[in-house]
Amino acid sequence: MKRLDLKTPLQLETTLEQLHAGMQRRLVASPPGLCPVETALNYLELSRSQSCGKCVPCRIGLAAMAELLEKLLDGEGNANTVRTLEETAASVADSADCAIGVEAANAVLLSLRGFRDDYMEHAASGHCLVAKKEAVPCRALCPADVDIPGYIALIREGRNADAVRLIRKDNPFPVACAYICEHPCENHCRRKMVDDAVSIRALKRYAVEMAGEVPQPPCAPATGKKVAVIGGGPGGLTAAYFLALMGHKVTVFERRKQLGGMMRYGIPSYRFPREVLDAEIRSIVSSPSKGGRGQDAGGCGQDAGIEVRTGVDIGRDISFADIRKQHDAVFISIGAHTDKKLRIEGEESEGVISAVALLRGIGDGEYPDFTGKRVVVVGGGNVAMDCTRSAVRLGAAKVTCAYRRRIEDMTAQREEVEGAIAEGAEVMQLAAPLKVEADANGKVAAFWVKPQIIGEFDKGGRPAPKDSAAEPVRIPCDIIIVAIGQGIDSKPFEAAGIPCGRGGWIKADDSTEIPGCEGVFAGGDVVTGPATVIKAIAAGKVAAANIDAFLGFHHEIKSDVQLPLPRFADLTAHGRVNPEERPADERKKDFACMECPYSDEAAAEEAARCLRCDCFGFGNFKGGRIEKW
Amino acid sequence: MVSFTINGKALQAEEGTTILQAAVTAGIQIPHLCYLKEINEIAACRLCVVEIEGVNRLAPACNTPVAEGMVVHTETPRVMAARKTNLQLILARHRTSCTTCIRNGNCTLQTLSKQFNLRDIPYDVKPERNAASDACPIVRDASKCVQCMRCVQVCDKMQTIGIWDAVGSGSRSVVDTYDRRPIVETACTFCGQCVTHCPTGALTARDDTDKVLAALANPEVTTVIQVAPAVRAAWCEEFGLDMDVATVGRMVAALKALGFNYVFDTNFAADLTIMEEASELIERIKHHNSHPWPMFTSCCPDWVRFLKTQYPEFTENLSTAKSPQQMFGAVAKSYFAERSSIDPHKMFVVSVMPCSAKKAECELEPLRDACGDPDVDVVLTTREFCRMLAMQSVNPANLEDAPFDSPLGSSSGAGVIFGTTGGVMEAALRSAYYFITGKNPDADAFAPYRPVPGKAWQESSVEVPGVGAVRFAVVSGLGNTRKLMEALKHGEVAYDFVEIMACPGGCAGGGGQPIHDGQELAAYRGKKLWKLDSESKVRFSHENSDINTLYADYLGAPLSEKAHHLLHTDHNAWKANR
C-alpha cells in the first residue's frame, strides 16, 4: 500500500492557475474611474470564494457584507447599512481565524474609509458620486491627455509626421517623452487583459525618429499680451509653447546656461541624447524672426512668440516684482534642483558629492573622470540609478549602489535597476548610511553602512527597514554620490509674497493658479515636489489654458490630423515587443543612447496590438477623443 | 472603391462604407436595434454581428467598414446563435408588456423577437425599476429601456442639449438624465426627438386621451378641436393610407367622427400669427434702434424653451406673437365664444399637434388670456389622435371628405407651410412685403430661398422696396440652431429675421408625429405641405377673409390693444429650468 503520492498538478489546477493569471492581469488593467462600492463588492466576492467555510466571521460575515454592499448599490440601503457594514467588517477583521477573512474585511474597511462620502451618497440616493466612465485608459492616465490610440493608429499606417503633430496638440515634447517618459499610460492598458500592455513609449520613439523634423503649426494672431515663464524645463517650455501658439508674447527666464531643466540637468544623455533634446527645444522656441515656426500659414507676428533669456537668476539679476510688473501674467516652473543631505558624520569630506551637482555638470558637458575610482551611490530612486550608471560610464573601477530597503522596494524603475546591474554595478540592499570615513587629508576613504532587516509596513504601504543584529559594514571608496531626493529653492518667490509650504513647495491649486496672487501661476516639481517630465508638461498645458483665460481669451488648441479608420481585429494573445538595448559591455563605455529604436517590423507588430479603445467599447459612444482644449 | 463579398455576392463600395450600409444597398437585410444612421453607430446591441472570413470573432456590421477582399457571411449558424443570445439578454432586462404598451405593433424589439422566432428567455427577467412620472410631456419608463443609447445620442448630437446620459457603473449602468434629476427639472425642451427615435416603449409622449374622452362625454361642455398644419401630412401613415386617400377633408371627417362639436384649423391661427408677426417685424424695422436684432420667430415652444435655457440673453429678440396654437385658443375662448354665445368656461379646446412640447406650452401659467382658464386645455399628438380613431373604431378609409367648421377653419396656403422648415419665414415675407409695398409679391417669389438639406442653416436676403435688404435665416434642429446662435453671439453673422424650428425639418418631423424606426420623414412630409400651399386658392395670410372679418369685427388691427392682450405674450413671465 502507498503511504505517499507526489503532488502532480491536475488539469483542474493548471486551468485554475491560468484563470488566476488572467485575473491578475485584469485587475492591473482595471479601468480608472470605477465605482468604489461596486469594486469593493467585486473584490469581496472574489475573497468569499476563497473562504474554507470553517469560521463564522469569514463564512457568514463576508456574505453578509456582500449583501449590504448589494443593498447600497441597488439603492435599497441607508446610513444604517453603511454603519452595519463598517461594524461587521471591523468585527470580521478582528475575529477571523486566518488571512482569508481578515484581509477581505480589511479591504472593505479600506474602501469604506477611503470613499466614505461615496458610500454615504449611495446610502442617500442609491447613486455613485465618483464613478466616471473612462473610455480610453491610456489617455485617462496620461497627465497631459495625449491622444495615444490616435497616434498609434497613425504609426500603424506609416504616418509618423502626423503622429508627431497629433501628440503636439497636447504635448510639445513628443521626442523627450519618446525617450524618457515614465509612461503611466501603459499601466492600465486594456491590452493587459489579453496579454500585456502596448509598448507605447517605444512606438512613440519610432514615430519621432521616422518623422524627422516636423514643422510647427502657425500661431494665432498676436494678442499684445506678455507672459513671463520662470524656468525653462519641460513645464515652463510647454506653457511657453502653447501660449505662443495662442498669440501671446512669452519670455522664458532660465537660471542655467541652457534650456531643458531636468531633461538636461537631471537625465544623462545615454537615456536622452543631447542633440535630440537640443533639436526639440529649438523647434519649440523657434520664432519667425529666426525663420522657424509657421511654415504653412503665416507664423507668429512680431509681438508673439518665445524669447529666451538664459543665465538669469530671479532675485539676483532681476526681482520677481519687476517681472510681474512687466508682464500680464507669470508662470513659475523652477523645478526641484537642490540636493538633500544624508546628515551623517563625515558628510563634508572631500569626495562626497550630490547627485544634483554631478548630473548638472554632465548636463553642461562637464564629465568628471572617475577612472580607477571606487564609487558608492546612496539612494534607490531613478536619480540614484542615473548616477550609478553615469559613474560606470565615467570609468569607475567599481560602483556600489547602497540602499536601505530591499531592491524590490526601490522607487527606481525595474529596468533601470536591472540595467545598472547588467553594466556591472553592484546593488547593496538593506544598507543604511551610517557614516563617512575620511582619511587624514579629509578625503573620503570609506562609506559605512548599518545592515538592515526588513520589517513591518510603514504608513505609505512599503515595508520599513530596521537595524539588524549584524555588525556595520565598511565599503572602501573614493567617491560618494548622495541621491536621496531633491529639494526646492523658492526663497526669492516666498520673499515676494508667493505662498510656499513645507520644503519650499509653492502652493498652487490644480488649475496652477496661486490663490491670492492674481495673474501668477505655478506648476511642475516646484508645486508637486520631484515628479516626472510628463507631469510637468501637463502643468504647463493647464497653465497655458488658464493663463489664456485669465488674459481674457479662449484660444482653442486642436489638430487637423485626420485619423485612420479602426480595423476590426481578433483579440489573439501576442507578446509585447520590447525595444532592445545595446549590449551592456558596449554601452557602459560611453554616454551614447543605450536603447535601440524599433525596426519597421517591430513597430508594425506592436502598433497592431493597440485595441483602439477610442473606437471600440465606450470610446465610440462617448469620450473616445478630445478634439480640442 | 473596395471589392468584397457578402453572402457570396460580389460587391463594391466606397472606402469607409460599413458592412451594414453595403448590405442594405445590395438588398441584404441584417437585423439591428441600436443603430441609427450617423447618430448612433456604437454597436451596443450586437444584434448586427456578422462573420468575416479570417477573423475569429463576430464583427458588428453597423460600424465595421468593408475592406478589400473581405468575405462576409450574415446568416451563419454561429451568427444566428449569437444574435439570439443577445436578444434574449436584452429581453432579460426589458419589461415585456406588449399588450398594454403604447408601442405595441410599432416596436423594433417586438419585430426582432418575432423575426428571431424567440419562444423563451432562459434568464431571470429583471427590468430596471420604473419610476415614470407624467409631470411633463416626456415620459420615461426605465423598465422598458434597452440602453441602445439612441436617446443620449439624439439629444447630444441632433439637439445638443444632453439631457440623457449613461450613468451608474458596471452591470448597473443605466440611462437617466444628467444628475439623475426628474426630467421636468432638467433643461429638456420636450421636443420629443428622443421619443420618436426610441425603438421601444421606454420613451413616450404623455398620453392625454383620457382627458379628451372625458370632455367629449360631458354634455355640458362644448368641445373644440384645432389641427396643426403638419398633422395632415403624417396622420395617414398610421393607417397605411396614401395622402391621395387620406385627404385633409377626410382628416376633418375623422375628427368629426370622434364627436367634437367644432373642428377648426390651426392654419387659421397661422394666418393670424403672420398678421401679427409680420406687423411686429415691420414695427421693429421702423424703430430699428429700440430693438435687439434679429427678431426670432416664437411659434415653436421647444425653441422658446431652448432659448430661455441656453441663450437667455436673447429673450427680447423673440417675437412677442403667441404660437398659432395659443392664438387659436385665445380667439376661440373670446371671439368665437362670444359670437356663438358659448360660456368659455364650459368650452374645452383641444389641439392635435405634431409636437410633444405643445403639451407643456398650453400649461404655461401666462397663457390664459381669453377668460382666465387655459386658452388651450389639452394637446394631443398626431399619434394620440390616431389612437383615438382606433379606440372609437373610426376607419378613415370609409369616410367622406368634410369641410372645416366656420369661422376658425379657413386658411391660406401661407398657413399650411407653417408645418415645415422655412414655411413661417416665407409666409411672413409674403405678407410683410404686401404690408410695406401695398402689393403682393409673386406667391412663389421666395421659393428659391427654401431650405435645402445638408446645410446647418439657410440664409438669404430680399430687397423690399422702401426698406432695403431684409436679411433672414431659417434653421431647424436645435443642434443647427446652436451653431447659428453661436455665430450670432460672436458677431459672425447678422440677420433681421430668423425662423427657428426645434425639430429637424420643422414640425413635419416633430416629436409628436408617427414613428417609423430608421426613417426620417420630415422632408417627405414637408413636400406634401408645400404642395398643399401651391394648390391653395389663397396664398397670402392677409387675404384670408375670415381673418379680415376677425380684425374688422373684433380685434381692430394687428398689434391693437386687444390683439396685444389676446395674441401676444411676455416670454419673461415664466421660468424655464437651466
Image: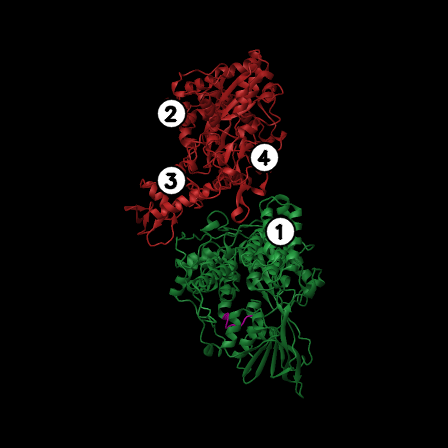
Does residue A627 appear in this view? yes
Classed neighbour count for the residue bearing mark 3: other residues with Cα under 10 Å, few (<14), some (14–19), many (≥20) = some
Disc 1/disc 3 C-alpha distance (Å): 60 Å
Disc 1/disc 4 C-alpha distance (Å): 36 Å
Q: Helix, strand or loop at disc 1?
A: helix
Residues marked 3 and 4 touching at CB (< 8 Å): no
- Which amino acid is tagged 3? Phe
Give the camera-side residue of B149 and B450.
B149
Q: Helix, strand or loop at disc 4?
A: helix
Q: In the picture, residue A405 is in which quadrant?
A: bottom right
Q: Which residue is mark 1?
A: A550
Q: In the picture, residue A111 is in which quadrant?
A: bottom right
Q: Which mark is residue B116?
A: 3
Disc 2/disc 1 C-alpha distance (Å): 62 Å
Q: Looking at the image, is mark 1 or mark 4 nearer the viewer?
A: 4
Does residue A369 appear in this view? no
Q: In the picture, residue A47 is in which quadrant?
A: bottom right
Looking at the picture, how far across and down is residue B59, in whole percent?
38, 49
Give the camera-side residue of A415 and B449.
A415
Q: Helix, strand or loop at disc 3?
A: loop
Pointers 3 and 4 within a single chain: yes
- Which amino acid is tagged 1? Phe
Disc 3/disc 2 C-alpha distance (Å): 29 Å
Q: Residue furthest front?
A: A1
Q: Which residue is mark 2?
A: B241
Q: Which residue is mark 4?
A: B184
Chain letter of the residue beneath label 3 in the structure image: B
Q: Looking at the image, is mark 3 or mark 2 nearer the viewer?
A: 3
Q: What chain is colored red?
A: B
Chain letter of the residue beneath label 2 in the structure image: B
